[in-house]
Image (cartoon, helix red, strand yellow):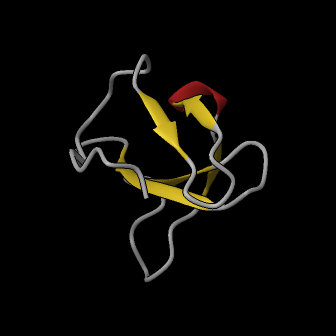
């Protein structure tokens, strides 16, 4: 997982690092998927590595 634990982060300049393959990427480069565990997909998204597809971070995308 990324070392950034702020779920309310909206800064696209932040780089995430994939623990699986080591790729560094921005939020805009990430592949987005629905979350696991029944979280509201309109509120939460999972950012995945654009290279290997591993899940990197689940992020808050809008206020309810």
User: How many numbered callouts?
Assistant: 0
Q: Where residue 50 sits in the image (x, y, percent)? A: 73, 42
On screen, residue 3 versus residue 48, left or right, reads left
Can you say whether 51 is above or below 19 in the image? Answer: above
Which residue is painted at 65% across and 40% down in the image?
A: 23
- Front-lying residue, 25 or 64: 25
Q: Residue at the top extreme?
A: 13
- Front-lying residue, 25 or 37: 25
Q: Residue at the front extreme?
A: 22
Q: Where residue 61 sits in the image (x, y, percent)? A: 37, 42
Q: Where residue 31 sits in the image (x, y, percent)? A: 68, 44
Can you say whether 6 is above or below 29 in the image? Answer: below
On screen, residue 51 versus residue 48, left or right, reads right
- Front-lying residue, 63 or 49: 49
Q: Residue at the right extreme?
A: 51
Which residue is painted at 52% across and 31% down in the image?
A: 27
Which residue is painted at 58% across and 34% down in the image?
A: 24
Quarter holding the N terminus is bottom left
Q: Where residue 39 sits in the image (x, y, percent)? A: 39, 72
């Amino acid at each position: 997982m990324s070392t950034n634990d702020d779920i309310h982060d909206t800064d696209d300049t932040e780089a995430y690092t994939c623990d699986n393959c080591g790729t560094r990427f921005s939020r805009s480069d990430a592949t987005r998927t629905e979350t696991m565990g029944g979280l509201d997909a309109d509120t939460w998204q999972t950012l995945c590595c654009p290279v290997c597809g591993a899940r990197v971070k689940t992020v808050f995308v809008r206020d309810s």
